[in-house]
Image (cartoon, rainbow, N blue to C red):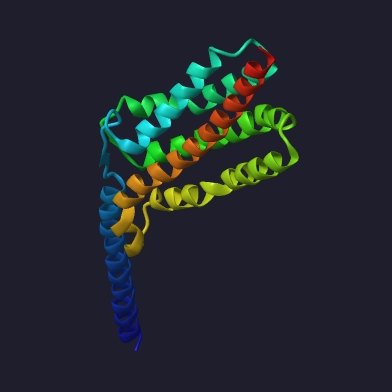
């Protein structure tokens, strides 16, 4: 009887180890595959990419018009916001020919830290005080939208940078790199358009005083 129980326990133990080994091997292979998916890149030429060039053109327009304005607090606030948009992460990405999911994540983080926390909170708020009530309402709505516009992108990027089994994510990682970049860049561009509008309004005030 003891011999039978001992043999039975050994068989069960070996079977259990076999099942554990099979599952471990399965998840290892799946994670390896998913890691390769996450490591995929998106090739882009920033010099010719239409959406990127629209953003750069808007920034250049702002900078050109700022040179026509006298030194004052408004000009200083806008210059600070332009620096936030043209941050180091953005410049680092421009030096690449391919971007991956980490680049998009860092670009989005830079938007939150430098554009939302610095430009919006420290510089745009006093600028809006000089606008009419109706303009303030529209711009505040746009700014509030931009504060949360890329939050879901961050969640997607974090999910895709975690090496676990998820077929739907594994099949769309490359698209998330491309689409995530353009989603985040769209927020940069919308912010630049707000600044461009404020510069144009400031220029009207300067022209009317001449």
- Residue 80: image quadrant is top right
Residue name at image x 50 percent, y 52 percent: 152
Does 8 sit left or right of 119 as displayed? left
Residue name at image x 38 percent, y 25 percent: 92
Does 162 sit left or right of 128 as displayed? left
Q: Is residue 165 visible?
A: no
Residue 45 or residue 190, whichever sits in front: 190
Pick out the residue farthest to the bottom: 1
Residue name at image x 57 percent, y 30 percent: 195
- Residue 23: image quadrant is bottom left
Q: Whole-percent x and y of residue 194?
A: 57, 34
Q: Quadrant of the C terminus?
A: top right
From what the image shows, is residue 170 above or below residue 36?
below
Q: Whole-percent x and y of residue 161?
A: 39, 48
Q: Quadrant of the N terminus?
A: bottom left
Q: Is residue 29 visible?
A: yes
Does 196 sit left or right of 34 as displayed? right
């Amino acid at each position: 009887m003891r011999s039978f129980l001992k043999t039975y326990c050994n068989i069960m133990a070996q079977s259990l180890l076999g099942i554990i080994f099979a599952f471990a091997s399965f998840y290892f292979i799946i994670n390896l595959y998913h890691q390769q998916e996450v490591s995929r890149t998106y090739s882009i030429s920033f010099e010719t990419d239409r959406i990127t060039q629209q953003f750069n053109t808007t920034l250049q327009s702002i900078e050109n018009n700022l040179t026509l304005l006298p030194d004052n607090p408004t000009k200083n606030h806008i210059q600070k916001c332009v620096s936030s948009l043209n941050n180091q992460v953005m410049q680092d990405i421009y030096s690449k020919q391919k971007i991956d999911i980490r680049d998009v994540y860092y670009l989005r983080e830079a938007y939150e830290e430098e554009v939302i926390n610095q430009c919006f909170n420290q510089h745009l708020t006093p600028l809006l005080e000089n606008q009419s009530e109706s303009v303030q309402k529209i711009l505040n709505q746009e700014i509030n939208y931009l504060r949360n516009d890329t939050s879901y992108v961050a969640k997607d990027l974090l999910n895709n940078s975690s090496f676990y089994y998820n077929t739907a994510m594994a099949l769309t990682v490359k698209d998330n790199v491309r689409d995530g970049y353009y989603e985040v860049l769209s927020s940069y561009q919308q912010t630049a358009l707000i600044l461009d509008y404020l510069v144009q309004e400031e220029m009207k005030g300067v022209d009317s005083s001449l």
